[in-house]
Image (cartoon, rainbow, N blue to C red):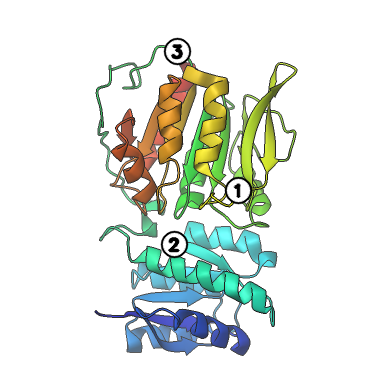
């Protein structure tokens, strides 16, 4: 079987050695070269023709952002950013510019961290090559998205093309690989604060979600924040589950309150979309819409069934725009998805749902 050819770009000799060792732990991967800056990175890509590049963002001569633009636009290469937590905001800028995913760079000499990062890096490398051919992160960079809606089940046509007859008070969104730019596209499309709340579980490690929420807040008219234990679920507010934790809900004094809890050993994906959806289904019943966006795996597939059992609505991002169609595909396979629609139509669909009466 042909191996995945990778070029490692990082100005730190320690990081290059560490990343190479991690990648060489996969039988299907071959590290064919490395570069210490962006200029050398371009030369290695031209000479070695890799299948993927791992990229540090802070380098001399040509920085990682410039190289990233070149790799994604000229070479159409998948890029995984490997960055320290201190550069969280830069990571999300890189995702907007076309990086497919990121891994938190291990601390020098921390062997326990290295083991954790190794598993995460290997998993994400393999995920990239489960992508649908012809779909890459440039979908988010001004490309023309398909303008069609595909019904995955019997739906009565309403004003927004969705068969419901009641307003939506809560939108619960689950996403993973490709999710950060997808969420930004949706939230920045809202033209005002609408009278519904949004809660999000985006698979992300601890320490990154506050910077992510702050970045989303700057480009959205909604109030976006990393959820804290005790936060109220309010109209016009978006709560992002903290990385590495789960977000659930309870009613306190007549108001819905977010609770941040430690994941159980059975939670394969964290923050868990299934756990979030199951929690809000019993509170909001038919007044909740679950939205499953791009991502690897099947997180959300159990939750959407519970949402539907309580009378709620389920939307999945269509295959045409999903960077990784794993999570939406698994949701559709349950038979409870009301609509599969492209990313550029999800914001308007949500708005119409919130206005229904």
Q: Position of residue 323 (x, y in %)?
A: 37, 54
Residue at image point 24% right, 79% down: 1
The residue wearing badge 3 is 166
Q: Secondary structure at mark 3?
A: loop
| Side (left or right) of 87 relative to 194 | right
Query: Considering only vertical position in the picture, is 2 above or below 357?
Result: below
Return the disc, 1 or 2, that comes first in the chain's sequence: 2
Residue at image point 56% right, 59% down: 93
- Residue 240 seen: no
Q: CA distance from mark 1 to mark 3?
A: 35 Å
Give the camera-side residue of 19 and 147. 19
Which of labels 3 and 2 is toward the front?
A: 3
Query: Considering only vertical position in the picture, is 52 above or below 42?
Result: above
Give the camera-side residue of 200 and 35. 200
Q: Residue furthest front?
A: 265
Q: Position of residue 263 (x, y in %)?
A: 62, 48
The residue wearing badge 1 is 264
The residue wearing badge 2 is 100
- Residue 94 seen: yes
Q: CA distance from mark 1 to mark 2?
A: 28 Å
Give the camera-side residue of 353 and 115. 115
Which of labels 1 and 3 is toward the front?
A: 1
Q: Position of residue 138 (x, y in %)?
A: 38, 58
Which of labels 1 and 2 is toward the front?
A: 1
Q: Secondary structure at mark 2?
A: loop
Q: Residues within 10 Å of mark 1 (few under 14, many from 20)?
A: few
Return the disc, 3 or 2, that comes first in the chain's sequence: 2
Quadrant for residue 32, please give it: bottom left
Q: Position of residue 213 (x, y in %)?
A: 63, 46
């Amino acid at each position: 079987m042909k191996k995945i050819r990778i070029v490692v770009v990082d100005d730190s000799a320690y990081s290059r050695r560490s990343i190479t060792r991690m990648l060489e732990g996969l039988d299907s991967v071959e590290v064919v070269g490395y570069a210490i800056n962006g200029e050398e990175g371009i030369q290695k890509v031209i000479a070695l023709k890799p299948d993927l590049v791992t990229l540090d963002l802070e380098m001399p001569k040509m920085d990682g952002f410039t190289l990233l633009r070149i790799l994604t636009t000229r070479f159409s290469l998948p890029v995984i950013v490997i960055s320290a937590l201190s550069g969280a905001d830069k990571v999300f800028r890189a995702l907007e510019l076309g990086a497919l995913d990121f891994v938190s760079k291990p601390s020098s000499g921390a062997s326990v961290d290295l083991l954790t990062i190794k598993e995460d890096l290997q998993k994400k490398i393999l995920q990239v090559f489960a992508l649908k051919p012809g779909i890459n992160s440039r979908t988010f960079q001004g490309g023309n998205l398909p303008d069609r809606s595909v019904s995955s089940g019997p739906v009565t046509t309403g004003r927004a093309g969705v068969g419901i007859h009641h307003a939506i008070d809560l939108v619960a969104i689950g996403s993973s690989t490709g999710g950060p730019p997808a969420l930004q596209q949706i939230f920045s499309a809202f033209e005002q604060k609408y009278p519904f709340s949004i809660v999000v579980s985006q698979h992300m490690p601890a320490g990154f979600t506050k910077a992510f929420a702050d970045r989303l807040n700057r480009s959205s008219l909604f109030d976006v924040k990393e959820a804290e234990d005790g936060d109220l679920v309010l109209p016009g507010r978006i709560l992002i589950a903290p990385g590495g934790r789960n977000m659930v809900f309870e009613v306190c004094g007549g108001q819905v309150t977010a609770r941040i809890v430690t994941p159980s050993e059975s939670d394969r994906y964290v923050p868990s979309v299934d756990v979030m959806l199951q929690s809000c289904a019993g509170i909001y019943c038919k007044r909740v819409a679950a939205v499953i966006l791009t991502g690897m795996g099947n997180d959300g597939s159990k939750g959407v069934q519970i949402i539907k059992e309580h009378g709620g609505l389920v939307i999945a991002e269509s295959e045409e725009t999903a960077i990784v169609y794993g999570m939406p595909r698994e949701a559709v396979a349950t038979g409870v998805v009301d609509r599969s629609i492209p990313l550029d139509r999800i914001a308007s669909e949500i708005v119409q749902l919130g206005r229904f009466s």
